[in-house]
Amino acid sequence: MHVLESDYLGPGQDLRDAIPAQTVVELDRITRWTVYRRLQELDVACECGCDRPLTVTIDTPTAALLVWSVVQTATLSKSSLTDHLERCWQQRSLR
């Protein structure tokens, strides 16, 4: 995920107190629409038009995590996702 512009928090600000951040995410055309549709299914506020970038409103830590997760799922290779999942399972079994 490549963020083009965003309204980031200032020093000492808490995300829960911040104004929702409009973040523009640069993705290829097909991935952009796939991510857009999935974020809509998850009720994450976003906009996407023909030949326009995906704009996402991140207003909670949950929304930030959902955006990250959806973009990672759409852009990483299946082997990378499988490796990550296996590492998660290994960490869980160590507890």
Image: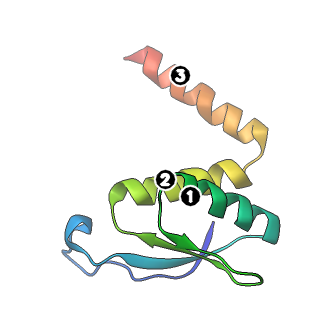
Labels 3 and 1: the sequence-earlier one: 1
Q: Is residue 73 left or right of residue 61?
A: right
Pointer 1: what residue? 39
- Which residue is label 2 attached to? 66
Q: Position of residue 86 (x, y in %)?
A: 61, 26
- In what element is the residue under mark 3? helix
Residue 17 at x, y = what percent?
A: 19, 71
* Mark 2 or 3: the one toward you: 2
20 vs 89, nearest the viewer? 20
In the depicted structure, whether residue 1 falls above or below residue 8:
above
Q: Answer with left or right where residue 59 lies relative to residue 68.
A: left
Q: What separation in Å lies between label 3 and label 1 (alpha carbons)?
A: 26 Å
Q: Which quadrant of the structure image shows residue 53?
A: bottom right
Kind of residue at disc 2: Leu
Place of residue 50 in the rendered image (x, y in percent of width and height, measured from the top left): 76, 81
Q: Residues within 10 Å of mark 2 (few under 14, many from 20)?
A: some
| Label 3, residues with CA under 10 Å away: few <14, some 14-19, many ≥20 | few
Q: Determine the residue positioned at 47% across, 57% down.
A: 43
Q: Which residue is mark 3?
A: 89
Badge 2 or badge 3: first in the primary sequence:
2
- Residue 60 in the image, given as x and y percentages of width and height: 33, 61
Taking the spot 40% from the left edge, 83% from the top edge, the residue there is: 7
3D distance between C-alphas at marks 2 and 1: 8 Å
Q: Amino acid at mark 3?
A: Trp
Depth order, front residue of 35/2 = 35
The residue type indicated by label 1 comes to Leu
